[in-house]
Amino acid sequence: SQELEQSPQSLIVQEGKNLTINCTSSKTLYGLYWYKQKYGEGLIFLMMLQKGGEEKSHEKITAKLDEKKQQSSLHITASQPSHAGIYLCGASGHNTNAGKSTFGDGTTLTVKP
Amino acid sequence: DADVTQTPRNRITKTGKRIMLECSQTKGHDRMYWYRQDPGLGLRLIYYSFDVKDINKGEISDGYSVSRQAQAKFSLSLESAIPNQTALYFCATSDAKAGAQPQHFGDGTRLSIL
């Protein structure tokens, strides 16, 4: 089965600083998703990446998928307290596993004012 | 209104009780899922359904059952609740279109079993 490893497990940054969260897969990714979760609340879908080398941005958050489609990074520029939360990556299975997703354990981000 | 609605949002109950968690969606998606989230263990799939007549076990289905009453409704039951089923439960949906499709989550049900 496909496993996703996220790093770091937790991150504390000063407001205004940039940061990067990584998600590494044991297998080639068919679809890679990034979610944000406020503590104790639901997961909010941020963006999806499918093609090797693809990059997408939403406000100050940019996500990239490497050419080999085994690693994705989420980069936040000029972090704000509103960026705090848990970031999870998820990945779709291919063929027989289509429709099922695997999730990383999450990266907890704290932004200090 | 939320696209994926879970009820109740919070529930405290006693060991041995039967509990049902409900999920309804307005996204028109065929695929629905139930997960539980525990600190340090991430999201774990309990059951999933790809259409009204389809029910599949996930990685941790023991102690749980589900019912897909309609395309828009997927309920999770704990027949006889036990304390280690205390967790945050999420329902999710996804489109059945070809290609990678993200899952969309409800706000969760926090379940505590005493």
Image (cartoon, coloured by chain):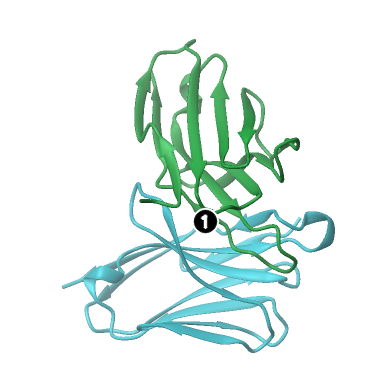
Chain colours: A cyan, B green
Q: Tell me residue B57's x, y (percent).
A: 72, 36
**How would you rate the neighbour count of disc 1 (Cα within 10 Å): few for under 14, some for 14-19, many for 20 or more?**
many
Q: Tell me residue B18's x, y (percent).
A: 50, 14
Q: Secondary structure at mark 1?
A: strand
In the image, what residue occupies the spot 57% across and 42% down? B72
In this rendering, does residue B42 appear at all? no
Which residue position is annotated with label 1? B104
Residue nearest the observer in this picture, B8 or A21: B8
Work out which residue is located at the far left of the displayed protein and give it.
A113
- The amino acid beneath tag 1 is His
Seen in the image, is A81 located left or right of residue A94?
A: left
Quadrant of the snapshot with the C terminus of chain B = top left
Q: Tell me residue A11's x, y (percent).
A: 36, 68
In the image, what residue occupies the spot 75% across and 38% down? B54
- Chain designation of label 1: B
Seen in the image, is A54 located left or right of residue A107?
A: right
Which quadrant of the view contains residue B109? top left
Image position of A91 with respect to A54: above or below: above
In this rendering, does residue A14 appear at all? yes
